[in-house]
Amino acid sequence: QVQLVESGGGLVQPGGSLTLSCVASGGIFSLYAMGWYRQGPGYQRVMVAAMNTGGSITYSDSVKGRFTISRDNAKNTAYLQMNNLKPEDTGVYYCNAVHYTDSAWGQGTQVTVSS
């Protein structure tokens, strides 16, 4: 089963940018659809961006035009480029990998947007 490790979170001012990374191991990365999810304080975990193995991408309405999901299969890594960050983007960001019945989550990385 694939294992995932996220990194790149931190504290950023409104309008700032961060890039999250998710490194996969233990599986054939190119076979997995990848997604990024956010869990804000007191909220359920929600999808913000997803990319399937064919390259099709979906974004939540709240991040369209600001976030970009990408993947580098040669590096077994998925990315989430986040621009023009807003306080409501604050939360723990998790990456998720899915291949048929095999699904894995990373441990999460905290993103705090505050002045």
Image (cartoon, grey):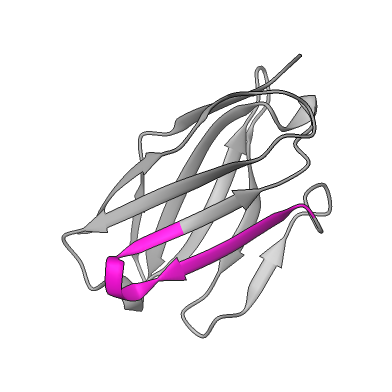
Does residue 95 appear to the left or right of 80 in the view shown? left
Image point (60%, 52%), residue name: 81
Image point (82%, 47%), residue name: 62
Residue 6: name its quadrant: top left
Does residue 93 appear to the left or right of 73 in the view shown? right
Image point (81%, 58%), residue name: 65
Q: Magenta span has 94?
A: no
Q: Residue 60 location, x and y as percent?
A: 76, 54
Q: Nearer the viewer, residue 101 or 16?
A: 16
Q: Which of 110 and 1 is in front in this view?
A: 110
Magenta-drawn segment: 66-78
The number of numbered discs placed on residues in the rendered structure image is 0
Position of 109 relative to 68 (above/below): above
* The C terminus - image quarter: top right
Residue located farthest toward the top when viewing the structure as drawn: 115
Does residue 5 appear to the left or right of 45 in the view shown? left
Residue 108: name its quadrant: top left
* The N terminus - image quarter: bottom left
